Image (cartoon, helix red, strand yellow):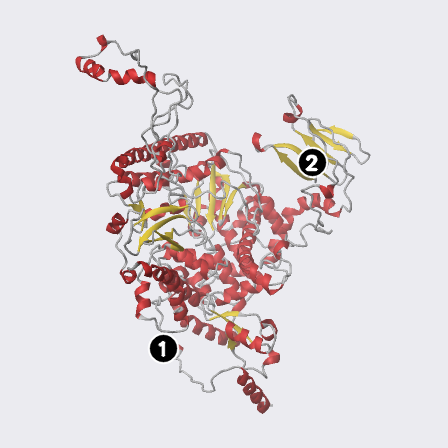
Amino acid sequence: MRLLRNYATKASREHYASSSLKIYRKLPSTSQLKSKYAPKTKPAEPANSEYAENLVKVQMISKNLHRQIFPQAKRDYDEPQRDAATRYNAELLRHGIDVESGSAMPDVELKLPPLRGKNIEEHFYSIAKEQVTPYEALLQPLVDCAQLPAKPKRWLFQTGWTAYDEDGSATPVDKPMEQGIVFDVEVCVREGSAPVLATAVSTKRWYCWVSSKLTKHRTNVKPVELCDAPENERPHYTPDELIPLGTGTPGLVRFPHPASLAGMLEMGCAYLPVNGNWERYIREAQLTYEDLSIEAKYHLGRRAEEACALLQDEQYKQHLWLWDEDWSVQKLKLKQAPKRKALPTAPMPDEGQLNEEQRRLQRKFQHLYDQQALLPARRPLLPGYPQWYRKLCRKPPSNYNEELDEEEPWLPGASEISTGMQLAPKLLSLCWEGYPLHYQREHGWGFLVPFRRADQQSTLPLDQLLERCAIPEFARQFAAAEEGNAALELLPRQLEEHLGKRQFHKKISQQQQRLEQQYKGAGVWCNQVLDDCCFFLKLPHKNGPSYRVGNPLSKDFLNKFSEHALSSGDTSCHAATRVIEIARMMSYWRNNRDRILNQMVVVVAGTLTRRAMEPTWMTASNSRANRIGSELRAMVQAPPGYKLVGADVDSQELWIASVLGDAYAHGQHGATPLGWMTLSGSKSNGSDMHSSTAKVVGISRDHAKVLNYARIYGAGQQFAETLLQQFNPSLSATEAKAKAMKMFAATKGKRVYRLREEYHDELEDRSYSGYEATRLAAQRNRIVSELFHRPRWQGGTESAMFNRLEEIATREQPQTPFLNCRLSRALESAGGSEQEQRFLPTRVNWVVQSGAVDFLHLMLVSMRWLLGPHARFCLSFHDELRYLVKEELAYKAALAMHITNLLTRAFCASRLGLNDLPMSVAFFSSVEVDTVLRKECTMDCQTPSNPHGLQIGYGIPAGQTLSIQQAIEQAGGNDLTQWAWLKRQTI
């Protein structure tokens, strides 16, 4: 059999070229590898210590907590487990991780309320079931209803609720008589967000509600004719089958755990308290916005008036920004003067009211005033001024009187100018990386890069451009006009040629090396040349090179000024700096003003991942010193006698992703490189995930953090390249791609294929690359999935995590790992491998983020169990949770928040088969006790609209931040069974 297998393998190699010579390189012993982190010695353990750690030296929760949360689990490790630990400890060391470098945290002793069940999973099921039982009793009749009542054939148009029985009779009622109904509302958008019509159905009858706004004032109503066309001929009629909901207990099919329903019901009760400071906030933000808007218009208008002077001697032709504007002038045509009589004398002020100098000037210019009679009836606007300037000005009304108080008084000059106009960047003489900006309709905003001197007259101010931007050294070899096309062709192709040859390990010629020095900025090639002497490169768009930039003064480019990628080419122009500063201040209020003023409604499951969605509070950013109105969140203020208690879940989604990889690969917390860095890594010594990525790629830790989360959410290498160029505009596409490839190789690893068992006799049992797998499958006239198992990631710090995420995401019916919630039917359909790959990033993102929603729902259930009616849910924003409680219960609520995090993470770990929990994630790093809603309780929220801050401007002091030890001390002890309401539950 051995001979036969060798023969088969040899035969297969004759069809698939490979070398028969094998070279083995001796790897250094793992004991010789040195970690880049200095080990820290843990303190000696006393005899009665609560300290515990697992096989990779990750500190676990104290022994007393483990006994209460995992009562049936033991912390003993057998010999096979210790042997396995040796292997993945070596893997950690290979990635530069020394498990001895972690530091010990203080132990925590707590007496928790008894679990409702044998373990933490039964406990959560029991308390969630208890919370949703009253609602299920109302929903059950609707679910069990086999057929709804017959819909009324005729609806009565009368104010209020009307009930329609099965016999067709209509009866006015105060409200629907059944407790469980299904309803829908209609609104009149122009009149507001309040409903004007509503329909509802129960198991017994139909209902209709009509607003009094519709039934009253029914004058001047346009007649509406009924359409007699059948439904299938109507333009918007799209027949389709309804999704069968089935019967049985609500939610058992797609959301089987009661915590999902309990969490969504709790989120529907969000309550944001505001007081009189709300109106003050809106008023001051709007006044500040209007003042700054006037100042910005003044600076732009002044620049426009100064630019009009370029009309003299056609100086505009040498201006680098305004050379292509419309400088045509409209002349003033006067009436022909009468030949037989003199012009009537124009009325002038009484000379007795004038001094001698004023009377002299009046006599000198009297003939000009007398020509007023020659003016045409329809006078042109600003004759003698260029056309582009006239577009910025308004013509005064024919009956305008400046002494009258009008709502919108007429203003002379460029009153219509704003930072959103196409002319504004030109007036401010903006440059990208030192090159003057230019606008083309088909490509949007870009900039000009000269590559040769023109042989003939050019419409471009080329001499001035060359003074500012010298011709790159590479382009001098293409100085001749007939060789301009050669330079043009080499510019867009050199990146691809360079990368391709690097991939195949070929040398780059000296000429190509010179070409790579042509331009190393972030400009986007668009195959445009002006006057055969200048390249036009597009400004980089945040969504990729296929998009065009519509306004370089938009919020996406405001940070580019502080990074010096965008700047003013006129060093004497201080207006540009001030206008940019004003634009940055105004951006937040301009984008959020309408949403803040309008009605705010929370949608508890408004996205694919079931995250809550709401246009104002769910998108509100933290206060910024240079943004008007960004103190919005701080306007949510607790009433007197109450406190806002909450916390941010530390690295919630990162922990979810890493623990999935740990449980999947080794069944041990921190056994994978990503898991260990998440649990025991430290920002101070650079051993955490974000610092590690930053060192590999050579970027800042903040930028690495963005890239890490984008990668976990399913973003690919191309997206990483775009982000890298946004972070560093001077980074070329070649450098960005090289950095992205290096980062993905170190983190995600390489994708490999393993042979199916039935082909081991024919082919060598090893890992194959994607190219090799495709080649082998084509040789055997098979598809890759028939010959190989599903590809897996290998060799990276995050390989185990991505293997687990993709394994869940590619299932026929994906479910969240904690509460078994199903994916949307739209992405669940089986469409083959092509469709599977198309939706894979979305599905991977869904696994992590929908798992985070499960985490949130579990926290809401736990807080309801621990505090009951003593806490009111206020807001959940991403990984942030806030509650409104009475002041005397604030510290107990803070301790309950810590314990909720402990129980929720313990439940998630238990669902993955891990009967333990690391100490580093067991409790919040801090819980905030405050009177206002803000990111950190010490933030004073100083902004242009709140220049004095909360302390001085509103009299709001700083809040408190409590660790688990501080919360235990402030709450009066660590025994929760002594809390009155919990004591009653245990009796």
Instruction: Let me know if residue 666 appears in the view.
Output: no
Image point 49% across, 37% down: which residue? 595
Q: Are marks 1 and 2 in contact (CB under 8 Å)?
A: no
Instruction: Let me know if residue 652 appears in the view.
Output: yes
Q: How many marks?
A: 2
Circle 1 packing at 10 Å, graded few (<14), some (14-19), many (20+), is few
Residue 933 at x, y percent in the picture: 45, 40
Image point 51% across, 55% down: which residue? 902
Q: Which residue is mark 2?
A: 199
Under mark 1, the amino acid is Gln
| Mark in front: 1 vs 2 | 2
Q: Is residue 83 left or right of residue 371?
A: right
Image point 80% across, 33% down: which residue? 168
Q: Nearer the viewer, residue 637 or 457?
A: 457
Q: Quadrant of the N terminus?
A: bottom right
Mark 1 or mark 2: whose residue is earlier in sequence:
1
Residue 955 at x, y percent in the picture: 38, 33
Q: Secondary structure at mark 2?
A: strand
Q: Which residue is mark 1?
A: 32
Residue 511 at x, y percent in the picture: 31, 68
